[in-house]
Amino acid sequence: MNVTKYGKRAPVVGGAKRIYDAVRNFLGLTVGTPLQRKLSKLAYILFFCALGLALVVFKVNKFDITNQVIIYATSLGISIIPESLVTVLTITMVIATEAERDYESERTAAAVKFDVPDEKLPAISEEVTEPEVQYEVEMTDALRAF
């Protein structure tokens, strides 16, 4: 801890940071891919919004909690979760994995990032040919079906 930055507050600031990190670790907001961390954060935000709406429902009914009020608060909490969230995430992930990379943009991005002069970069051939597949056995129509 930098004593000159925090002064006498250093133990308090350090303790607060440790508690903050412990809570984030417990909630799972520090592990996984960036997408998983964002989805975890979204899930907790939706959860706390649902709890807040349930408290509003209970407050409007002056905390006279009956079966109907509990059912209404539960259905309100469930309705906050987007119905198409899973579908949108699945489609987004499929599109992202199938996206083809543009070699030229990657090449220029690498050149800009590492400040490589153009004369040191290999020349790009205009026509790219796929290597010819060599088979050990003769291909028949029955094998080509697979």
Image (cartoon, rainbow, N blue to C red):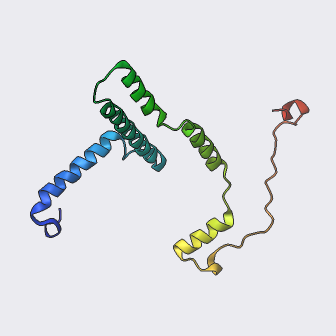
Residue lying at the far right in this picture: please name it: 141
The residue lying at 81 percent from left, 65 percent from top is: 127
Please state the horizontal and vertical placement of residue 117, each as a whole percent of the image: 59, 80
Q: Residue 66's image quarter?
A: top left
Residue 26 rendering spot, x and y as whole percentages = 30, 40
Q: Nearer the viewer, residue 43 or 26?
A: 43
Q: Residue furthest top?
A: 67
Viewer-nearest residue: 71 or 146? 71
Q: Position of residue 137 (x, y in %)?
A: 84, 36
As drawn, 17 above or below 90: below
Residue 22 position by quadrant? top left
- Please give the name of the residue rendered at 66% of the width and 52% of the height, measured from the top-left corner: 99
Looking at the image, is 97 positioned above or below residue 78?
below
Indicate the quadrant containing the C terminus: top left, top right, bottom left or bottom right.
top right
Q: Residue at x 40, y 45 (%)?
A: 41
Locate residue 102 relative to residue 143 in the image: left or right: left
Q: Is residue 25 above or below residue 109?
A: above
Would you say 2 lies left or right of 90 here? left
Instruction: Locate residue 126: give its quadrant.
Output: bottom right
Residue at far left of view = 8
- The answer to whether 78 appears left or right of 21 in the picture is right
Q: Does 25 sit left or right of 78 as displayed? A: left
